[in-house]
Amino acid sequence: MAKVFLVGIATGLVFTNLVYGFVGYDQHHFNETEELFLLEAHEHESFYSSSLLEGNGNPLLVGLTLIHNAATKGAVCLDGTLPGYHLHRGYGSGANSWLVNLEGGGWCNNVRNCVYRKKTRRGSSLFMEKEIPFTGILSNKPEENPDFFNWNRVKLRYCDGGSFAGDGEDQVAELQFRGQRIWAAAMEDLMSKGMHSANQALLSGCSAGGLATIIHCDEFRGLFPRTIKVKCLSDAGLFLDSIDISGERTLRNMYSGVVGLQEAQKNLPQICTNHLDPTSCFFPQNLIASVRTPLFLLNTAYDSWQIQSSLAPPSADPHGYWHDCRLNFAKCTRPQIQFLQGFRNHMLNSIKDFSRSNKNGLFINSCFAHCQTERQDTWFSDNSPVIGNKVIALAVGDWYFDRAGVKVIDCPYPCDNTCHHLVFS
């Protein structure tokens, strides 16, 4: 079992005893690459919700609401249970403003790991926490979340394993792949609870939820009158169709399984599927330039999840040459850093067309991390990561409220000493 440490380079802070792993893998005989995808699915939120509580001794806890009319629409989790969300009402100037956050947590790409997943909170509401902390962009405190603290803030739970895009089933394995229906049922329920009266709205998400934000951004815009401000924010959702260290495409192979198994192709943006294969249209790099709604991309140039699971997974590294580098960036050799600089270049090339649009926003920092909006330490705190003296929360706020255009790209590693790097051991 691996432990993960959050290292604040600027201050020397190290958050320890955060377990990034869970008991039970050896009973299921997953290979190492599958374990990485399942680690993401199972522990993604628990690690981040643990780390973001550092320095936040009294977070707001928000209860789970199940969507009771979802079953009649076939909008159910992998195991057939009801989907749900956590809603904290806005007040004052934010009473009619809505922020909808799509939960992340990996994917399942074959029957075996979807069957495993349906016995966790990533596949069944039976295992979801009854209440969760709202921190970072979901915080209700102005000193932690200056622009969105008094909005109606929603976290839609992720229990389909397909970034809210699938619509199929496997009757033999008793699996329901209903992410698209969950999305639609949740939006309908939230509209009935006041979102129809919104005077401004923001769709956000982290990781697999960041990908879902890109996929559903224009659908979200379509829920509201054209006269109101609607934008989208994808955090750590820029998953690249990259060649791994062995010359293979680990993530493409994984996505191919997700799209095929979950029948997601019919719900992917048609402007993409008209000229590319469905798997290519699950990669954000092929979607972002055609999103009509204003979109902000927040990503680390050295995304720790992509390094571990896509670029240098154990399956691509049979001799373990990348083992230490994969866990701790400080142990990477010069050639390994050069390879990772190539990944950064790939990311920057993939956003060139996207960044030409004045309506879009960009914050690409040179950190070894993954997800920065829901952690208080990276979203808005005394030592948060910055580019040009601007922290992430203020960059997003400036872009959303049109206070300033925001398209900032950090200099290459190791120039940024404000990062909160993730180190695994």
Image: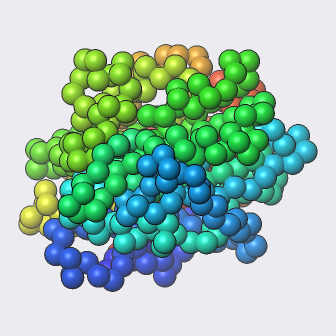
Q: Residue furthest front?
A: 72
Q: Residue at x 38, y 26 (%)?
A: 269
Q: Residue at x 20, y 61 (%)?
A: 172
The image position of residue 70, as x and y in percent, is 53, 51
Left or right position of 161 against 99: left
Above/below status of 118 relative to 23: above
Q: Residue at x 13, y 56 (%)?
A: 316
Front residue of 293/193: it is: 193
* The image quarter in which residue 51 lies: bottom right
* The image quarter in which residue 412 lies: top left
Numbered circles on residues, count: 0
* The image quarter in which residue 190 lies: top right
Left or right position of 137 against 254: right
Which quarter of the image is occupied by the N terminus? bottom left
Q: Residue furthest right?
A: 92
Above/below status of 222 relative to 40: above
The image position of residue 133, as x and y in percent, is 66, 66
The image position of residue 170, as x and y in percent, is 24, 54
Q: Residue at x 44, y 55 (%)?
A: 76
Residue 362 visible? The answer is no
Residue 405 visible? The answer is yes
Which quarter of the image is occupied by the C terminus? bottom left
The image position of residue 57, as x and y in percent, is 73, 75
Colour pattern of the rendering: rainbow
Above/below status of 54 relative to 107: below
Left or right position of 393 against 124: right
